[in-house]
Amino acid sequence: MTEEIIIAGFGGQGVLSMGKILAYSGIMQNMEVSWMPSYGPEMRGGTANVTVILSDERISSPILNVYDTAIILNQQSLDKFEPKVKPGGLLLFDNNGITRYPVRKDIQVCVIEATAEAVRMGSGRVFNMMVLGGFLKLKPVLEIENVLKGLQKSLPPRHHHLIPMNEQAIRRGMELVKPFTVAS
Amino acid sequence: MGEIRLMKGNEAIAEAAIRAGCDAYFGYPITPQSEVLEYLMAEKPHERTGMVVLQAESEVAAINMVYGAACTGKKVMTSSSSPGISLMQEGISYIAGAELPCLIVNVVRGGPGLGTIQPSQADYFQATKGGGHGDYRLIVLAPSSVQEMADFVKLAFDLAFKYRNPAMILSDGVIGQMMEKIELFEPIPRVNEFDQSWVTTGKTPDRQRNIITSLNLDPYLQEEHNHHLQEKYARMRREDVRYEAIACDDADYLFVAYGSSARICQKAVQLARKKGIKAGLLRPITLFPFPEKILGDLSQSVKGMLAVEMSAGQMVEDVRLAVNGKIPVEHFGRFGGVVHSPEEVLEALEEKIVKPVV
């Protein structure tokens, strides 16, 4: 099994840390992992993205042009990465601020209203964990207990008291995610 | 089994230095390798092993601190990125002339000049053909994974002391900045077990004084010294060439690539094979000494080679020398800080090698 994932959004949305938690969780599941932050000129535009690869085999290129899954958190990233999902792949997006919606019909498109839910809960801190939960619901490539172990590894000990809150957010994300119907 | 961690390539260099029993690190921050110094500062290796970590006032100061400390037979190192390594060239030439072991890490970024902070492989000529003035060579290792970033620190010190010669790890912004799972080797004590008979730590009554210098005003003695250096480089070529051959046995076409480009080409090999193109990858691990013999051998069995590097074409010259005109050798690479994708690389192989050759 190899899962090639791009996570893209604004800096500050927890894009890189979501990737890091995915990578740590992969290690907890005895997988090979790679985490490659966006290193292109687009960093200057205020967007952040990270390529995460989880695999049972040795990972070849950490830099990719097409992906099994795109997790998209803003409009620019949707425009940029929707065409780069492999046919049959998954596009998961948060609809906050989205005005041009996905159009492809040869991929699975799902939406998660994680920003809205985070506002309702009065905390933006676990927004990215809700999105991660949504992804894991759609593609259960990692077991929840390994994700929790990954969180433990990824967070400094002074933040370990926040792990239950993160777990709750992951589970809430699993409930929130739903299919998106592409307009014909 | 060693400790498993998720680390950036730059952090792996730093942790491996502590574990390899490195005695001192002298450096100056520059993107994209600043995490080496940052990690060492945060880790306080002086408390773990006694290793000294010092931020110098400039790269010029750092390399001269390396020069001085290396005279004592200690394991010493520095790290920087392209513009910083250019500043160090005078010192590196002196260290090579004085035959001192040390480790220099270059996490390459786009040039020339201040260039960009994005990844590049355009310092190949500088690393493998001398860099500073005079007839000298560095041992140059090219890691293509975070695991190798760690492992090659130890290997580089071993080779530097084996030959009393500066060794360089030539990495790039991709391998420096990415995180991967690595298995860390067990720490070895900070005691140098290599030959110490040449060091300048104080003369003992039973021997002549040791002199470390790169200056010799008598041209005949300097010529003799140069012959000695050349013999040393010839021995490196005989004994310490390293490479990895991936899917080469039945290959019709070959990618030749090192570092992050080798990873990208590995994917391109998979994509090519899916399309029915029998591609393979020869990955030089030592850039000096260069794996010329295996490339010469492979030129008997493959129809063409594509050197893929994030430069306008540097290593391709060494591939051409090794192949000596027997088959077509072309170059492909994005550069100036742009990284090629596996699809682009495969397309280049088809355009430049497969189509013309068939």
Image: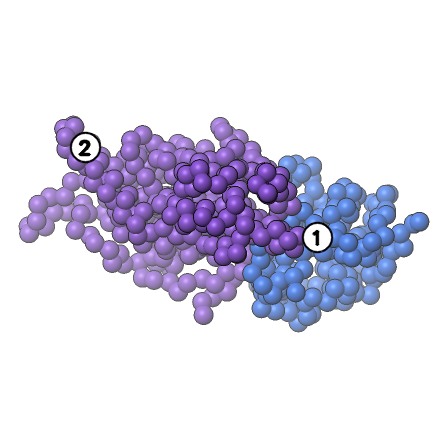
In the image, residue B211 sits, relative to residue A131, either above or below, namely: above
Q: Chain of mark 2?
A: B
Residue at the spot of label 2: B223
Q: Is residue B257 above or below residue A148?
A: above
Measured in 3D between alpha carbons, the distance from the residue under mark 2 to the one under mark 1, in whole angstroms, is 58 Å
Residue A107 horizontal/vertical position (percent): 81, 55
Residue type beneath disc 2? Glu
Toward the viewer: B206 or B224? B224
Residue B242 in view of the camera: yes
Q: Name the amino acid type tagged 1.
A: Tyr
Q: Is residue A183 left or right of residue B294?
A: right
Helix, strand or loop at label 2? It is helix
Q: Position of residue B72 (x, y in %)?
A: 23, 47
Task: Classify the position of the C terminus of chain B by image quarter.
Answer: top right
Q: Residue at x 28, y 39 (%)?
A: B96
Q: Which residue is mark 1?
A: A67
Chain of the residue on which disc 1 is drawn? A
Q: Quadrant of residue B104?
A: top left
Query: Which of the labelled discs sits on residue A8, or is there none?
Result: none
Chain letter, colour purple: B
- The residue carrying pointer 1 sits among few (fewer than 14), some (14 to 19) or many (20 or more) residues within 10 Å by Cα, namely many
> Is label 1 in a helix, a strand or a loop?
strand
Single out the residue that lies furthest toward the left. B205
Say yes or no: labels 2 and 1 on the same chain.
no
Q: Which residue in the rendered view is the most extreme toward the right?
A: A184
Question: What is the letter of the blue chain?
Answer: A
Q: Residue at x 57, y 48 (%)?
A: B264
Check the picture and name the quadrant holding the N terminus of chain B: bottom left
